[in-house]
């Protein structure tokens, strides 16, 4: 069998598998995602703490009304520069269910730093009932799950930023929106149940930064990337150390080879 036939046969099999859903589709396929410049991008990249704090403010003030972050705990916020007292205050702002007490009853108490972020709904059914049947996804790992074919954290950040800024009031003439749907050119299929969550001035930043739509989108994308890729900076440092070790090791091996074979030559 010729190589041409083998290649054509393989392409046919892959196409067929994709048609029946066996081959996973790129979650951002057929969408318009714009690449941004991120502080954590690149070999020496790191997270910008003021931006992480602004991103948490957006999650707290806007996103947390619908989206949970079940894998995050309030104590984790100390890693992005909040003080212990600030974290205690964030946690105490919510009431969490605890118990049972001595009488066997459950009770409500103020949150503690060791508690996970409080979910906005008690269960999936309650979440769907409050969102016209749509289920708001948990945001703990959203940056990883939306990274598409890439394996770097900023792929997911690009998607989140594009999604937040990708809403259009008037869809193209050939697009018919479903009931309670919104047009977004970054979303796969372009129809999304979530209304635009951000806009110019949607929040008043504690650090005085101007809250434009683009700034808000960058801040929440950075915060969600940190939540999903909390060890990104550590991986960068480990990679640098590994490369330095390999460079030094290579030079030592080369020097040893030159010394051992000097007399032979």
Image (cartoon, grey):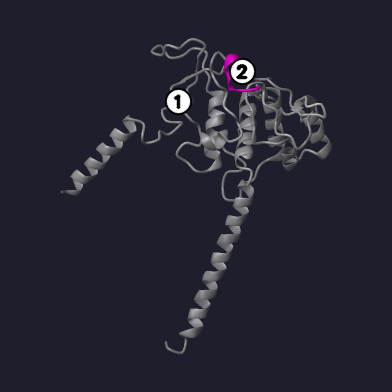
Residue at the outermost left position: 1
Give the class, few, some or many, for how many residues have Cα within 10 Å of label 1's Cα (few <14, many ≥20).
Answer: some
- The furthest residue to the bottom: 263
Residue at 33% from the left image edge and 30% from the top image edge: 20
Q: Would you say residue 209 is visible in this rendering?
A: yes
Prevalent SS, magenta region:
helix
Between discs 2 and 1, the one toward the N terminus: 2
**Nearest the eye: 151 or 261:** 151
- Checking the image for residue 94, the label placed there is none
Q: Is residue 157 among what the camera can see?
A: no
Q: Residue at x 46, y 85 (%)?
A: 261
Q: Quadrant of the C terminus?
A: bottom left
Q: Give left or right: position of 210 versus 107.
A: left
| Residue picked out by circle 2 | 126
- How far across and down, in percent of the image, does residue 129 sit? 58, 14
Whole-percent x and y of residue 177? Answer: 45, 12
**Quadrant of res 120:** top right
Name the element at disc 1: loop
Q: Image quadrant of residue 114?
A: top right
Please tell me which residue is depicted at 46% across the width and 31% down the height of the picture: 28
Q: Most extreme residue toward the front, as rendered?
A: 103
- Circle 2 or circle 1, nearest the eye: 2
Magenta run includes residue 181: no
**Neighbourhood count class around disc 2 (C-alpha, 10 Å): few under 14, some 14–19, many 20 upward:** few
Drawn side of residue 186 relative to residue 45, left or right: left
59 up-or-down from 148: above or below? above
- Among the 4 quarters of the image, the one containing residue 199: top right
Establish if 183 lies above or below 52: above
- Tell me the magenta residue range: 122-130
Q: Residue at (18%, 44%) from the top-left corner?
A: 5
- Label 2: element kind: helix
What residue would you read off at disc 1? 188
């Amino acid at each position: 069998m010729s190589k041409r036939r083998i290649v054509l046969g393989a392409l046919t099999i892959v196409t067929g598998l994709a048609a029946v859903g066996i081959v996973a589709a790129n979650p951002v396929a057929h969408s318009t995602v714009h690449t941004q410049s991120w502080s954590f991008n690149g070999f020496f990249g790191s997270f910008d703490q003021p931006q992480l704090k602004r991103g948490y403010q957006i999650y707290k003030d806007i996103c947390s009304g619908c989206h949970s972050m079940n894998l995050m705990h309030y104590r984790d916020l100390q890693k992005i520069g909040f003080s212990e007292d600030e974290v205690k205050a964030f946690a105490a702002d919510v009431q969490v269910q605890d118990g049972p007490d001595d009488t066997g009853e459950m009770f409500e108490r103020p949150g503690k730093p060791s508690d996970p972020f409080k979910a906005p709904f008690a269960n999936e059914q309650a979440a769907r009932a409050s969102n016209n049947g749509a289920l708001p996804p948990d945001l703990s790992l959203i940056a990883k799950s939306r990274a598409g074919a890439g394996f770097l954290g900023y792929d997911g950040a690009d998607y989140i930023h594009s999604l937040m800024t990708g809403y259009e009031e008037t869809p193209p003439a050939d697009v018919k929106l479903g009931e309670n749907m919104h047009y977004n050119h970054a979303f796969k299929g372009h129809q999304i149940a979530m209304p635009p969550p951000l806009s110019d001035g949607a929040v008043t930043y504690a650090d005085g930064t101007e809250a434009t739509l683009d700034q808000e989108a960058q801040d929440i994308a950075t915060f969600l990337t940190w939540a999903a890729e909390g060890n990104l900076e550590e991986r960068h440092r480990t990679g640098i150390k590994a490369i330095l070790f390999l460079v030094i090791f290579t030079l030592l091996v080369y020097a040893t080879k030159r010394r051992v074979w000097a007399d032979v030559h």
